[in-house]
Amino acid sequence: MNENEIYSDSSRLNYGDGFSDDDAPIVMPPTPYRGRMPMQNGGYYPQQGMTGRYPPYKKKRKGRFFLKFLLILFLVAILTILVYLILVLGRIHYTGETVDHSVAEANGIVLKENPDITNILVFGEDNHQEGERGRADSMILLSMDKNTRQLKQTSFMRDIYVTIPNNGENKLNAAYSIGGPKLAVETIEYNFGIRIDYYMTVDFESFTDIIDSVGGIDLELTYDEVAYINWQSHKNHQTDDEDELKKDTLSYNLNNEGYYTALVHLNGRQALWYARDRDSAGSDFDRTQRQRIVLNNVFSRLSQSNPFTMLGTIYAVSGHLSTNMDPIAVTGKGFELVTAFGYDKQEYRLPTSDNYYDAYFDHCGQSLVIADTELEKNRLYTFIYNAS
C-alpha cells in the first residue's frame, strides 16, 4: 500500500480496518483547515470537490498579533497618562475654599458672567515662607473665551485704592495680606463687578523652573533692563559675572516705541528679575507689563513645544501651585488652559492710563493709585465680554 492510497481513501483512515499495527497509517491531528491532510512537499490536499490551496494561515495569525500589540500599547499609554495625572494632582495644594459671591451681591452688585468664558485669577506670591502667607506681587486675571478663541490677560495694579469687604479701604494688595486669595478675589468682585470662580496662587520662584523647562525665552530688552538683570543676579550671589548678559556687546536697534532694544535670550532666573524690575523704567505700571510679556512668551513657547516639554512644565509648576479648585476641576480647567495657549492673546491693565492719579495716605503710610472704579468696571466688562 502506497502513501497516495492511504490519503485517497478516507474510509480506511483508522486503526481497526484490517491493518496490522505495523501497517497502520499515521492519523494526523486536526488542522485549522477543516481536517485536510498535509502533503509531504508542503501545503494541504484539497477537500472533495475543491481544488487549490487555502490562503496561508500564518497571515491571519500575524494580523491578530499586530492588533493585540496595538491594544497593549494603547493600554500602556492610558496607564502612563493616569499615573502622570495622579502624580501631578498629588503635588498641588487644594485650599477647599469657595468664593463667596454674596459679598458683592448683598451690596446690589450684579456680577457679570458668561458660561463660555472662564475667569481664573492668578496670584504671583513673593517672599513666601513655610507655614506663612507671602504677598501678592502680581494679580493677573486669565479670561478664556471658547467662542472667540481668545485668551485675555488683565493685570490689576496692587496699589490701586479699593474697598475691601468688611475691612474698610486700602490698596488691593492689602486684601491678600489680610485674607489671602479668597478675600482678594471677593474684593475684585466687589469693586469691579466681574464674577471669578477660581483662583490659582503660584510661588514666584516657580517661574524659574517653568521658564527653564521650556528652554528659556527671547525678549527685546533695553540697555537699562539688561543692566538691572546683571546687577540683581550678581548682587544676590547667583553669578560671579557682573556682566553676565554682556550688555555692551549686544546689538541694539530702535523699536516702534522709540527705545533702543536688543533681542536677548533669558533663562528662568534672569527672566524673573526682568518681571520684577521697577527701576529701569520707573513704575509699577511697567512692571505689570513686563509680567504679561513674560507670561505671553511662556504661553507661546508652550504652544510650540512638543508634548514631553509641555508635560515637564506642568509637572514643574504643580509643586508650587495652590488653588480653590478640586482635582476634577483642575484636570478640566487645566486641559482648557493648555488649549488656550494657542488662542489669540490680548492684554489689559487696570487702572487704565487716563483714569488714575497717585496719592499718599497717612493712615496706611503708603503711596496709592486712585481711580474711578465705576469707569474701570465698565471698561473691564467691555474688554472681557466684548460688550458695552
Image: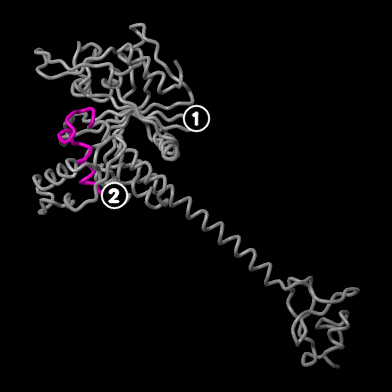
Rendered image quadrant of residue 344: top left
Q: Residue at x 74, y 84 (%)?
A: 42
State the scheme by which the image is colored. one colour
Q: Which residues are magenta?
A: 263-286
Left of 319 or right of it: where is 61? right
Q: Which residue is mark 1?
A: 148
Q: Residue at x 30, y 19 (%)?
A: 188
Q: Locate the N terminus by quadrant.
A: bottom right
Q: Locate the C terminus by quadrant.
A: top left
Q: Earlier in the sequence, mark 1 or mark 2?
A: 1
- Residue 74 in magenta? no
Q: Which residue is mark 2?
A: 216
Q: Measuring from the top left, give residue 342's x and y in whole percent.
A: 44, 40
For the residues marked 1 and 2, what is the alpha-carbon distance in whole angstroms?
30 Å
Q: Tag 1, which secondary structure?
A: loop
Q: Measuring from the top left, give residue 52's x and y in whole percent.
A: 83, 77
- Residue 266 in magenta? yes
Which residue occupies the extreme right position in the image? 49
Contact (Cβ within 8 Å) of mark 1 with mark 2: no
Q: Residue at x 16, y 51 (%)?
A: 248
Q: Measuring from the top left, give residue 91's x and y in whole percent.
A: 30, 42
Residue type, numbered disc 2: Gly
Q: Residue at x 18, y 23 (%)?
A: 177
